[in-house]
Image (cartoon, rainbow, N blue to C red):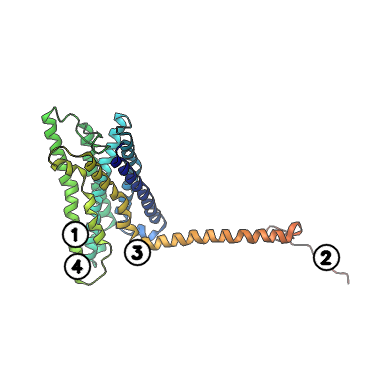
Amino acid sequence: MHTADLAASVFVLGIIVVSLLSNIVVLICFLYDPEIRKQVPALFTLNLTLCNLLLSVSNMPLTVAGLLSQGHTGGTVFCQVVGFLDLFLITNSMLTMAALSIDRWVAVVFPLSYHSRIRHRDAVIALGYTWLHSLCFSTVAACLSWLGYHQLYASCTLMCSGCRANHRAKAQFIVFTVALQALSFLLTLVVMCVTYLKVLQVARFHCRRIDVITMQTLVLLVDIHPRILELFYPGPMSPHWAVLSKCLAYSKAATDPFVYSLLRHQYRKTCGLLANKILKRNLFNSSSAPWAESSLRRGGPHLQKTTTANDEPPSIKPSAQ
C-alpha cells in the first residue's frame, strides 16, 4: 500500500469521527431546545445534519476500505446503492447550503420583514425541491448505469464504465455531468457568493458583528465537487489528486456543524446547558455515594427505620389518670 493511500485513510477516518460527533451534538441540541426548533433555519440545519450523518456512515467507511484494499469491497448492486446515496446526499447538502445562505441574506438585509418573507412553509417547500432535485439526478444516473466503483476516487460514485467504447454514451454522460455541476454545485457556489457578499456589505455598513459569514465563505473552497476537476483536468488524472479532492469534499461533513450551528449563540448556549446538567448529575452521584456509605458505617445494623408516607403512625396509648 502506498504511503499516500495510508495517509488518506487516516484523514478520512478523522473526518468520520469529527463528523459523527459534531453532527450528533447538533441533532441533540435540535431535539433538546424548543427555541431552536421554532427557528426556520433549523429545518435546513436538520436536513444538512442528516445528510452529513448518512454520508459519514455509508460512503466514507467504504472509501477507507477501498484505499486500504486497493479495490472494490462489495457487490455491484451494493456499490450502486452506495453511489446513489453519494450523489443524492452531496447534491442535497449543497442545495441546502444555498437555501441557508438565502435565509441569512433575507435575515440581514430585510430584518424587519424577515418573518413575513421566510416562513416554515417556505422552508418546507425549499427542502422539498432539494430532495426532488437530488432524487431526479440520482435516479437518472442509476437508470443509465452510471453508478459504480471509481478507481480514481477509491469509492462508489458517479462513473461511466462503457463510455470509452461507446461515443454516444460518453456524450450523454458529459451532458449529464455538466448539467449536474451547473444546476447543483455551480448554482450553489454562485448563490452563496452573491448572498454572502451582500451580507458582508450590510454588516460592515452598520458596523455590526460579523458572525460566522467569513467561515461559511471559506467552506466554498472544499465544496467544489471532485467531478469538476476530472472534467477539466488535461490528460489522465492522478489518483492521489483525485483521492485528495474526494477527501476535501468529505471534509465538508465535518465542518458544516461548526459553521452553521455550533458556533452560533443559541447552539453554544444549549451545549452549555447540557454540559452543566450532565456535570451536576455526575457530581451529585459522586458526592452522595460516599455520604451514604459513611452513614451506613456509623449506623450499622441498628439504624432506625424512617417513617414514610405509606407507614402507619405509631399508636399512642392513653395515659392513666
Q: Which mark identifies residue 202?
A: 4
> In what element is the residue under mark 3?
helix
Q: Amino acid at mark 1?
A: Thr
Query: Which sits earlier in the primary sequence, circle 3 or circle 2?
Result: 3
Cα separation between marks 3 and 1: 22 Å
Query: Taking 315 as reference, is 198 left or right?
Result: left
Query: Which sits earlier in the primary sequence, circle 3 or circle 1?
Result: 1
Q: Amino acid at mark 2?
A: Lys
> In what element is the residue under mark 1?
helix
Q: Position of residue 310 (x, y in %)?
A: 68, 57
Residue at x 25% of width, y 66% of height: 210
Given this view, does label 4 or label 2 mark the residue nearer the observer? 4
Q: Position of residue 273 (x, y in %)?
A: 44, 62
Q: In what quadrant of the picture does the N terminus appear? A: top left
> In what element is the residue under mark 4?
helix
> In what element is the residue under mark 2?
loop
Q: Which residue is mark 2?
A: 317
Label 3–label 1 contact, CB within 8 A: no
- The answer to whether residue 180 shows anywhere in this view is no
Q: Which residue is mark 3?
A: 265
Q: Which residue is mark 1?
A: 195
Query: Which sits earlier in the primary sequence, circle 4 or circle 3?
Result: 4
